[in-house]
Image: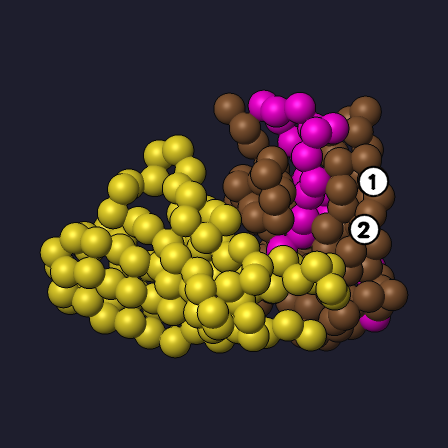
Chain colours: A brown, B yellow
Amino acid sequence: EVQLVESGGGWVQPGGSLRLSCAASGFTFTSYGLNWVRQAPGKGLEWVSYISDSGSPIYYADSIKGRFTISRDNAKNSLYLQMNSLRVEDTAVYYCARRGAEFYYIDVWGKGTTVTVSS
Amino acid sequence: SYDLTQPPSVSVSPGQTASITCSGDNLGGYFANWYQQKPGLSPVLVIYQDKKRPSGIPERFSGSNSGNTATLTISGTQALDEADYYCQAWDSISTDWVFGGGTKLTVL
């Protein structure tokens, strides 16, 4: 079964840092690009970052550029998101999401991990 | 940046056809994808590359994309289709993955 399982969410004060992880299983990890997509409470989906199957290219949304870093460890079948200088508006459920094989769509989503930024 | 616009809400009677639109500048020149999200759950891909259906998605879901508008059509809408629907496209110029604001489909 294809699975993406996020972890690392939690509560952090503004200005703080968190590192999210996503463990993948059930597919050939090195063949797929991966995304982080977030959803603020009661709001819509917002794309955060993308990393290709090989680790390059990497793309970031303007809203997090310079603060967040996406990376992957193909030996561990894992995706990461290092989040620094967190703001209240970064509060959201963060989904790990697999890019489809044929083009830029998402065919598999994790269940998400919740990040709360509050003082 | 590239923007996609969806109506906030659409209502449909059971058994009727629901159409959800997604508008963007020359959207027909991009591939449009559609996701269904039910409360408390992760999104699910229902249409990709304008009109392709993933395995397991009922035939009543279909898509089209031309000009400035992509459309998700649900024929014979059922109560279980009630959900939020999001369109998405990839902007090759900015390299952004862009989502529409979402449409709440109510079946009543």
Q: CA distance from mark 2 to mark 1?
A: 7 Å
Q: Is residue A62 left or right of residue B67?
A: right
* Residue B29 visible to the viewer: yes
Q: Which numbered dot is residue B69?
A: none
Q: Is residue B29 left or right of residue B16?
A: right
* Residue occupying image coordinates x 51% and y 24%: A1
Residue A2 sits above or below residue A40 on the image? above
Q: Is residue A75 left or right of residue B63?
A: right
Secondary structure state at the residue bearing disc 1? loop
Q: Tell me which amino acid carries mark 2.
A: Ile
The residue that mark 1 highlights is A55
Q: Which of the chains bears the disc numbered 1?
A: A
* Residue occupying image coordinates x 39% and y 57%: B64
- Where residue B14 appears, as percent x and y from the top left, is 13, 59
Provide the residue span drawn in magenta: A15-38
* Residue occupying image coordinates x 53% and y 67%: B27
The magenta stretch spans residue A34? yes
Q: Which numbered dot is residue A58?
A: 2
Q: Residue furthest right?
A: A66
Secondary structure state at the residue bearing disc 2? strand
Residue B77 sits above or below residue B103 on the image? above
Residue nearest the viewer, comparing A11 with B1:
B1
